[in-house]
Image (cartoon, grey):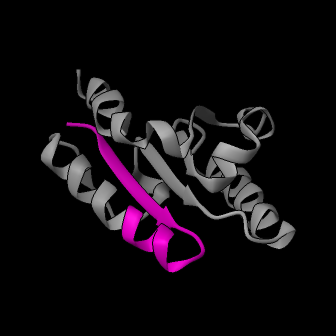
């Protein structure tokens, strides 16, 4: 069974989206773990209200990749929607999913179980 760790950044809408995403991942058969250091997949649900918010996400991506280089990182949310190429270039990022395709994340990650 694939394991995941979900991190939510930013606004209330992002937090609500993250709760729905977590439910979808659990329903797809993925197992939630307590930290990205022990997960196979880290899901970062981002906000892009400020440049500081974007910088925080980039820092977290680099930290996850350094601590757990085998962890595959999926970045979604507003930052992924606004700057997908920038996000895709970060080390360890395997998927960039904008808000318009967020409903496909559980299906994509369920393939990691196989």
- Which residue in the rendered view is the most extreme toward the right? 51
Could you say where residue 62 lies in the image, as x and y percent from the top left? 73, 51
In the image, is residue 55 above or below residue 67?
Answer: below
- Horizontal relation, residue 98 to residue 81: left or right: left
Count the marks.
0
In the image, is residue 75 above or below residue 34?
Answer: above
Question: Residue at left 53%, top 55%?
Answer: 44
In the image, is residue 65 above or below residue 16?
Answer: above
- Quadrant (top left, top right, bottom left, bottom right) of the N terminus: top left
Could you say where residue 52 lies in the image, as x and y percent from the top left? 83, 72
Which residue is more in the foreground, 91 or 7? 7
Question: Residue at left 22%, top 44%?
Answer: 30
- Quadrant (top left, top right, bottom left, bottom right) of the C terminus: top left
Could you say where residue 106 lies in the image, as x and y percent from the top left? 30, 38
Question: Residue at left 56%, top 77%?
Answer: 11
Q: Residue 97, located in which quarter of the rendered image?
A: top right
- Which residue in the rendered view is the most extreme toward the bottom? 12
Question: Residue at left 63%, top 64%?
Answer: 47
Q: What stretch is highlighted in magenta?
A: 1-17
Residue 11 inside the magenta-drawn segment: yes
Could you say where residue 5 lies in the image, as x and y percent from the top left? 40, 57
Which residue is more in the foreground, 48 or 67? 48
- Which residue in the rendered view is the most extreme toward the front? 100
Residue 34 inside the magenta-drawn segment: no
Q: Residue 23, located in which quarter of the rendered image?
A: bottom left
In the image, is residue 37 above or below residue 81?
Answer: below
């Amino acid at each position: 069974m694939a394991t995941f760790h979900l991190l939510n950044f930013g606004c209330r809408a992002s937090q609500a989206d993250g709760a729905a995403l977590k439910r979808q991942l659990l329903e797809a058969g993925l197992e939630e773990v307590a930290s990205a250091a022990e997960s196979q997949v880290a899901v970062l649900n981002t906000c892009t209200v400020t440049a500081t918010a974007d910088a925080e996400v980039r820092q977290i991506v680099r930290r996850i990749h350094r601590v757990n280089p085998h962890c595959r990182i999926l970045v979604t949310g507003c930052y992924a929607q606004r700057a997908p190429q920038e996000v895709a270039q970060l080390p360890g990022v395997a998927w960039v999913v904008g808000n318009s395709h967020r409903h496909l994340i559980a299906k994509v990650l369920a393939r990691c179980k196989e």
